[in-house]
């Protein structure tokens, strides 16, 4: 039995990732044939929408890959070093020694990659719009009792499932 749900494409993408990571490895011993069938069907329904989004994200990453490699090289070049010669980071950020020279080189890098950065910015804006679009999907009804205890979910992960899980 199916139900129609209205979700943003961003929700669909996150739900697809959740289904892939937490549910696709279940066996019929874990959840029963009926639940496994519903999960497989749900995965199949979400897959095409999620794949479109994955491709858009991948395209942005490709656009920025060369720039990002150069930026990392510059960060490493100007980073303070520990006693072993490794770059020092704080809260995930390089601790920069010569900030003036670093900023000058980063500014030059941004100018050199101006077109790619503009294209990536536009692609990101388009991706944001895509993620906000709503679509209707006919998805299988999954009863709360059908979810196996073996699957460990956080509250945020369970929140993604709320539109498709039905209380008895």
Image (cartoon, rainbow, N blue to C red):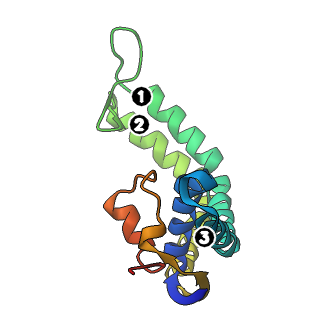
Tag on residue 134? Answer: none
> What is the CA distance from the residue labelled 2 to the residue labelled 3?
28 Å
- Secondary structure type for disc 1: helix
Report whether residue 26 is seen. Answer: no
Sequence-wise, which precedes: disc 1 or disc 2? 1
The image quadrant of residue 153 is bottom left
Q: Nearer the viewer, residue 148 or 13?
A: 148
- Secondary structure type for disc 3: helix
Residue under the image location 68 percent in, 61 percent down: 59
Q: Position of residue 38 (x, y in %)?
A: 62, 71
Sequence-wise, which precedes: disc 3 or disc 1? 1
Q: Is residue 1 above or below residue 44?
A: below
Q: Is residue 95 above or below residue 41?
A: above
Q: Is residue 79 above or below residue 100?
A: above
Mark 3 burial class by Cα count in 10 Å: few <14, some 14-19, many 20+: some
Badge 1 vs badge 2, beta-carbon distance below 8 Å: yes
| Residue ID for mark 2 | 102
> What is the CA distance from the residue labelled 3 to the residue labelled 1?
30 Å
Report whether residue 78 is seen. Answer: yes
Q: Position of residue 88 (x, y in %)?
A: 34, 24
Q: Nearer the viewer, residue 166 or 131?
A: 166
State the residue lying farthest toward the left: 90
Tag on residue 123? Answer: 3
Q: Nearer the viewer, mark 2 or mark 3?
A: 3
Q: Position of residue 51 (x, y in %)?
A: 68, 67
Residue under the image location 48 percent in, 68 percent down: 146
Tell me how many marks there are: 3
Q: Quadrant of the C terminus?
A: bottom left
Judge from the rendering whether residue 146 lies leftward or rightward of residue 60; answer left or right. left
- Secondary structure type for disc 2: helix
Tag on residue 78? Answer: 1
């Amino acid at each position: 039995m199916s139900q129609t749900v209205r979700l943003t494409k961003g929700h669909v993408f996150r739900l697809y990732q959740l289904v892939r990571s937490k549910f696709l490895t279940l066996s019929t011993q874990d959840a029963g044939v009926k639940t496994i069938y519903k999960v497989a069907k749900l995965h199949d329904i979400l897959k095409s929408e999620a794949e479109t989004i994955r491709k858009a994200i991948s395209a942005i990453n490709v656009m920025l890959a060369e720039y990002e490699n150069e930026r990392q090289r510059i960060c490493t070049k100007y980073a303070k070093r520990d006693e072993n010669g490794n770059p020092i980071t704080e809260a995930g950020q390089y601790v920069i020694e010569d900030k003036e020279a670093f900023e000058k080189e980063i500014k030059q890098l941004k100018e050199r990659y101006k077109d790619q950065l503009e294209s990536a910015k536009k692609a990101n804006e388009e991706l944001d719009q895509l993620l906000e679009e709503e679509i209707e999907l006919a998805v299988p009804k999954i009863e709360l009792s059908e979810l196996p205890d073996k699957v460990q979910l956080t509250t945020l992960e369970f929140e993604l499932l709320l539109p498709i899980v039905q209380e008895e």
